[in-house]
Amino acid sequence: MALRLERFAHRYTIGFYATVIATAGLAAGGCGGAPIAPPSPAAQEPKTPEPQEVAWNPFVVAEPGGRILITYYGGRGESEHRLLFTRSLDGGVTWLPEPVQLDSPPLKDNRFGFHRLETNGNGRLSVTWAIERKEETFWRVREVRNRQSSDSGTTWTGEALRWQFHQQGNYPTSLTDRDGVLHLLWIEGPSAGGIPRFVRTTGAGKGWAAEPLTIPGAKVTPIKHRGRDLPVHREPAWPVLAGGPNGALYAVWQEASQRQLFGTGTDILFNRSDNGGGTWLESSLRLSTPPPSPTRTARIPVVAVNQGGEIYVVWEDFRHNTSDLYFNRSLDKGVTWLSQDLWLTAVRPPLASATNPILLADTSGNLYLLWEDIREVPHSLYFNRSLDKGVTWLPHAIRLDRHAPNEITRGHRLAHDDSGHVYAAWAQGSETKVTVRFRHSDDYGATWTEKDQILDSGQGKDGPRVPWLTADGKGSVYVVWSSDRTGRYHLYLNRSLDHGRTWLPQDVRIPGSPLMKTRGS
């Protein structure tokens, strides 16, 4: 099982499924809750060692009152692992005595893809995950599964609800609303000629709608060839699905359309539904605004939506022959957008390449942006923010990490609250020594703590894997990661109760259980 640092940034969990917070659906975090007593590190260690158990790839959600909810992969590694759930209701002091098994090991030549945990803050949980099948030399998503709980994970629905892709299915993304309705968006068909498809569940998530819908592309001027219009040609990829108020849904993706038939250029497209996915706009809007060109590539969008239905989109763009970040926004639930997109990384040295952006928005329209760049040394971490809904940004990006040229930063995470606290966590180091780092800002990202803080207190052979960062909105901040310090990978946690200013002096290990004792399957 390859767990090296260079494989930390899996796009399923970092680029999309982890960073889009849909305010109208079940959220990836919560707010509220009273202060909780610090846990005792000694109390977290299992009474008996579990040398054969492995735990990795956590997805973590914080709810009010010190509730921490985690899904992760656990087992004996390789093909013998399962999708598991555990929780703490007291800020990490105690955990479930045994994890809940949500799914058993996939069949031969199959594996787990992404998994996503969502909550409405009132006990309803939804976990969605993908099953990938090996086809020749490629792994493709062939099935998406979902299970839900109405009592904060004490009990779960029985057999998983399944959606099978009868044609090639790529880039699935999901969203569950507060009533348990699951929405699924993906690209159906081969990469050359695929189409965005959408389907939702019915009966409070107990079954699927009869037929999936096709989301239209943008209007294009027909290309004539020998006196005839060429057929419409679409190459969509990397869709993102987000939710707005009153059942609104927003879809954003990259697409090479008919006008780029003889080149490789792509646009960022947007479509919306005002009725929970029942109907969509007849044609999609183009958010990237340079003149049409087969050589201009806009790709991999990320989306942030706040409770008022303001929609903010950032993507990687190559119109200046290197990867830059561009921005567009709508303040009226996707009806109108900026007539000209905004170049966010215009102030930079000649050697720069902005990739893997994370974008968050608070209830007031303050925006927080974190990305990876090479402008000083490779694989470094930069931050910018806007306090006026994207009109203006800091004149110079702030570098958050500091490392030697032979080290790299991977797996960056970003969190915030509505009081101006912003948090960043990442893994940093070399092939043989990696640490989990953290910095925070108390003034909406204008200034940051002078030094980053190391959150893990032990080293293994390969070091910690990519961390997960979440906050409850009232000052409690949690970071969870997987480390092999015992010889096998287990989950570890560190926690702050004062907006990231102080942390536990030693991280704590999250207990697990042998495979034969898992329950809930």
Image: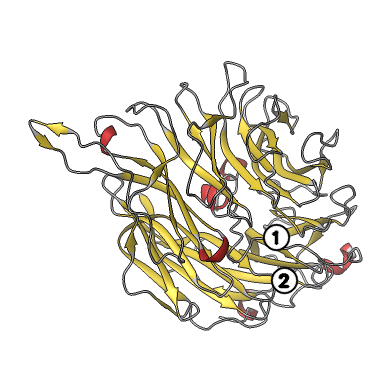
Q: Classify residue 511 by image quadrant.
A: bottom right
Please, is residue 376 above or below residue 89 in the view?
above
Say left or right for 383 vs 116. Answer: right
Mark 1 is surrounded, within 10 Å at the Cα level, by few (under 14), some (14 to 19) or many (20 or more) other residues, namely: many
Q: In this view of the protein, can residue 402 be seen by the observer?
A: yes
Residue in view at x 79 percent, y 46 percent: 420
Q: Which residue is mark 2?
A: 87
Q: Is residue 439 left or right of residue 3?
A: right
Instruction: Name the outermost residue toward the left.
Output: 226
Q: Residues within 10 Å of mark 2 (few under 14, many from 20)?
A: many
Vertical side of 263 occupied by 389: above or below: below
Please identify the quadrant where the C terminus is shown: bottom right
Q: Quadrant of residue 319?
A: top left
On the image, the x and y values in percent for residue 129 come to 50, 65
Q: How far from the left and from the top, in percent, is residue 497? A: 87, 57
Q: Residue at x 30, y 42 (%)?
A: 219
- Residue type marked 1: His
Q: Residue furthest top?
A: 350
- Which circle marks residue 286 in the picture? none
Amino acid of disc 2: Arg
* Left or right: 336 in relation to 381: left
Marks 2 and 1 sit apart, C-alpha to C-alpha, by 15 Å
Residue at 82% x, 58% y: name it. 476
Q: Is residue 141 above or below residue 97?
A: above
494 vs 233, nearest the viewer: 233
Query: Looking at the rendered structure, which numbered label has been put on residue 490?
Result: 1
**What residue is drawn where x is 77% and y is 38%?**
445
Sooner in the amino-acid sequence: mark 2 or mark 1: 2
